Image (cartoon, rainbow, N blue to C red):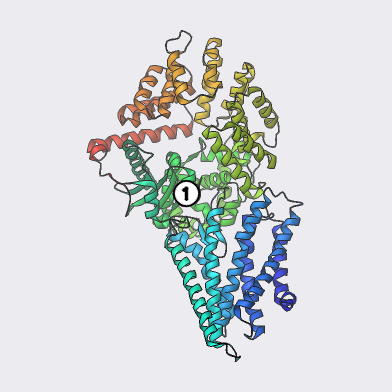
Amino acid sequence: MRSLLTGRSPLVVALLLFLVSLFCTQIPLFNYLGFEFSALISIIGAFATAIMTIHEWRKTKGMIAPIVFFFRLAIVSMLLLLVPLVVMIVNALFVKNCSFAQGFMFFVLVPLPAVLFAVSVAMLISVALKRWRRLSAIIVLVLVLSQIIIETFTAPQIFSFNQIVGYFPGFTYDELLEIGSRLLLFRVTTVAWIVLLLILAHLGWVRHRPAHPEPAASSGRQRNVLAYMTIAGAIALIVVSWLFRSELGMLSTVESISDELGGVAESDHFVIVYPKAKLTSAEVQELVDTHEFMLQRVSIDLRTVVRRKIHSFIYESAEQKGQLVGAANTNIAKPWLWQLHLNLNDVDQSLRHELVHVVAADFGFPLLRIGLNPGLIEGLAMAVERTAYDETLHDLAAQVFDTGIRPQMEGLFSFTGFIQTQPAVSYVLAGSFSRYLLDQYGLRRYKRLYRTGSFTSVYGKDLEKLVWEWRRQLNRRPIAPEERVKASYLFKRPTIFKKVCPRVIASLNIEANNLLRKGNLDGALALSGRSLELARNASAIITHATAMKRLDHDDKCIQFLEREMSDTTISHSLLPLNLLLGDAYWGAGKLDRAVKSYERLLASRLSAPFDEAASLRLYLLGNTRRSSTYQSYFTRHQSDSARIDFLSRLLSARTHDPAVTHFLLGREFMNQKNFRSAREHLQSAGGFRSPTLDYALQIRFGRTLFALRDFQRAKMHFWNALNFTADQSRTLYVREWIARCEWLHERSQQGTTADASPLRQRSSVH
């Protein structure tokens, strides 16, 4: 044992782990005891200890029983892992570690089993082979790691449980990482593999070991029986865990996801798997129509023909999606599998984007069916969408550069550069640049670029020259002061690599939001407060303030928000809170301050829903009687039924404004999907003589009629909405709805939708 501890190879491994850990102290996200650091140490430690095992076993000349030698090496390996652990503990004096307990759990469940697994692999190879031992061990460990790639490309999920890294979350922008129970369960199979490999190594050694006194025949047979029983038990555990991977949450298949969601609808170009308990038959039909319409639009934009059906998986919630395929809050596509994975609430916003990825597979790199770098992949999807954040892509790109952000465009068209850039920035710039290339040079050239990744061979100009041309066009766009406010909110956000304890804080924030949604306001207040103690972050501030407001603590809410929003280092990320702050001022009787808060929000043109909310409040505060009549509706938290009862009672009151009351009732019934009642009230609303509110009224009326499948009248109201906006982005949005109405009306006239639709619904796919 002493010779092992003082041998050269363990010292080399210790030095390697020390240098890697020291290097990690300078890299954000890897500079504290967390999942990323543990995963990196597990990979390096596994390969290093496997080679060390082979080297040390050769020195014994096979004179020591493998089981005995393994336990000695296991102790040495655990001592070696103390090196990176101590480095991170010391570094915690300089870098904040928000949850040492969670980090230590990851360290125990990720690198420790990985190293012991690698030692057992090396032991079996050392006994079984006389030559090429190191190379064989490296090949075996690489093959084990390749499981991640295989599952990523063959299964719907983006995560993978692996004997070396423990868990691979996939490439996603999600910051939440909750895998404790599943990882612990998976590591039971790692123990089974270690036992199996070790006993096989021992049995091989017994057969070929050097001459020695023979043990008694009976004891030898007993040991063999015990060994074979252990092998059988280990194999049984491995096989059972493999066969029931879906049930254990370690693998998802098309069948297991379909069984979990429960509903499957098939149309001309799609097999849509959806949460059966969540959607009515009418909503399923609308979901299918939306898919078919979006595919038609994307196919026209990319001039392609889809030759096989696309599987679209629609998940009831982010939590369900995260459990089944990973990427809880990130919608994804797998073009090589012809698959989409979307959250139900994100279908309208994300379906076109993800469809572009699948349809573009027609001219993507062979086999992989994707572009050669994320800048081209995401840039094309954004370019087809044309807008984002209620702005055109070119306007947004101009705002990015105006805020002083100077990303390396060459880096955006490389894998590492794209993911290290703040997502809103990378997506917008790649989209605007791709839109420029499409408009300036045409789709045919971009398709070649998408496949090859070579700007010079496709355009006869290098990337730097093309970027200069694009930037020259952007520089002609004037930037208004209010646009700078919105741009700061959208683009001046830190990436995960620059956040303090992102995994821990994301977990606290999501749990706090869940409590807020369930009405546990005190719990949400406490958890968001804990998050703020670790680091000041916008999500926790929003939850904390919302909980205060719903508890009717207006004065406390005002004090809290005024303090947070006065800090220029974070105030730009709190722009939407002007609505909540205005409501708190209104509830406290500070009407002048409420007006200023709403005006700040409206001036920023953050989004159409925020414009509607701010304009409606300003409309009411412009009249004292209206202000007092509707104050409790906007400033006090009430249930849906209580709000509807309040508005219904107002219909007979002299002080109410018919346009406002009917509009609000229409909104409430829309939210409850009672579209017939919503139609009656929106029709009675008349108008506001406010372009913003009249635009909102026409859009809501159009969407209500659309849900009732009255496509012709819906189209009329969408056309009317164009009279109240000159904004290019919103004009594109309205024209999209008009095109959808025309398309569906034409299909209904041809008998290809509604009752005559080829849509077939069934409970699951088998």
Label total for image: 1
The percent coordinates of residue 474 (x first, y second) are 57, 41
Res. 277 in view: yes
Above or below, 279 relative to 242 = above
The percent coordinates of residue 47 (x first, y second) are 61, 70
Q: Which quadrant: the C terminus?
A: bottom left
Q: Residues within 10 Å of mark 1 (few under 14, many from 20)?
A: many
Q: Residue at x 65, y 40 (%)?
A: 531
Q: Return the residue found at the far top.
A: 654
The percent coordinates of residue 419 (x first, y second) are 58, 52
Residue 578, picture quadrant: top right
Above or below, 678 relative to 13 = above
Residue 623, picture quadrant: top right
Left/right placement of residue 615 relative to residue 15 reads left
Callout 1 secondary element? helix
Above or below, 364 relative to 351 = below
Q: Which quadrant: the N terminus?
A: bottom right
Q: Residue at x 64, y 73 (%)?
A: 71
Residue kind at label 1, given as amino acid type: Leu
Res. 170 in view: no
Left/right placement of residue 744 relative to residue 556 reads left
Q: Nearer the viewer, residue 234 or 474?
A: 234
Q: Which residue is mark 1?
A: 380
Residue 756, picture quadrant: top left
Q: Nearer the viewer, residue 617 or 486?
A: 617
The percent coordinates of residue 710 (x first, y second) are 30, 29
Q: Nearer the viewer, residue 27 or 424?
A: 27
